[in-house]
Image (cartoon, helix red, strand yellow):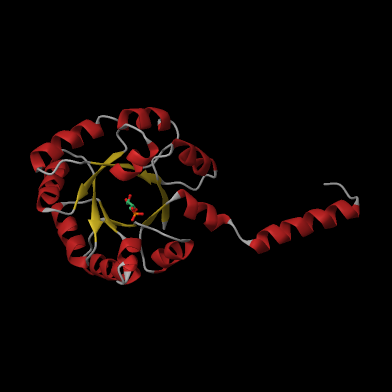
Amino acid sequence: MKLFLDTAVVEEIREIASWGVLSGITTNPSLLAKAGRSVPDFMREIDSLVKGPLSLEVTAESSEEMLKEARKLRGYGENVVIKLPLTPEGLKTCGQLKEEGISSNLTLVFSANQALLAAAAGADYVSPFIGRLNDNGADGNGLIREIRTIFDRYGIAAKIIAASIRDPRNVTEAALNGADIATIPYAVMKKMIAHPLTVDGLRKFKEDWENSRLSL
Ligand code: E4P
């Protein structure tokens, strides 16, 4: 499973990209608003940092306006994937973008049927929102499992992005249930690397080595 960072904070991208673990980035209007970044500003700053796909979301409601926004967003880079909402207008736009050779990521997916519709419209990525489902007493991991089973059974190539990740366990479960990608917030990424036994083990290695007075 590939790891994407779900953020619009440039410093977070710089730090996690330096680990060499990032395969892409997803953003959304809320993340950009929180970071106080306009899209051109954001794209200029992360230019050399991001190698893989980078999802930027449209905000329009009609397909006509979504298309205009999508073409503009795609103008910021060849790796830009257009994030579209799972609405009739979003599906319509997805098909049109496909014809123009522009990749799309259908977002706000909360059911297997929505994922099927996204794939049928030509989506390259579908983003089921695990955390928001779990927050509402539903089974986010179960949804990943259902979509994986259906896509495998019918040879559907769209990639499943486990989104709305809340904690490291969500990432493990997304991987176990067959997501192709997990898009992970910075805070969760930092928790994923941390383990008290790693810290203890490192301290002990250092202590033993220093006491030995040997050299490398
Ligand atoms: C996915 O692409 C979205 O940006 C994101 O995962 C939304 O998650 P949230 O529920 O934390 O807002």
Q: Can residue 157 be seen at all in this image of the molecule?
A: no
The answer to whether residue 103 is left or right of residue 24 is: left
Kindly identify the residue that appears in the image at 31 percent across and 72 percent down. 137
Q: Is residue 190 visible?
A: yes
Q: Quadrant of residue 148?
A: bottom left
Count of numbered labels shown in the rendering? 0
Depicted 71 relative to depicted 129: above or below? above
Q: In this orientation, which residue lies closer to the viewer: 156 or 62?
A: 62
- Name the image quarter holding residue 59: top left
- Residue at screen point 53% across, 57% down: 192
- Please tell me in which quadrant of the rendered image residue 112 appears: bottom left
Foreground pick, 135 / 141: 135
Q: Position of residue 6 (x, y in %)?
A: 39, 48
- Residue 145 in the image, given as x and y percentages of width and height: 31, 70
Q: For the N terminus, which image quadrant? A: bottom left
Position in image of residue 205 (x %, y %): 78, 57
Q: Residue at coordinates 49% horizontally, 52% vertically from top-left?
A: 187
> In the rendering, at what x and y percent does residue 120 appear?
14, 57
Image height of 115 relative to 8, above or below: below
Position of residue 109 in the picture relative to residue 191 (left or right)? left
Is 121 situated left or right of 53 in this image? Answer: left
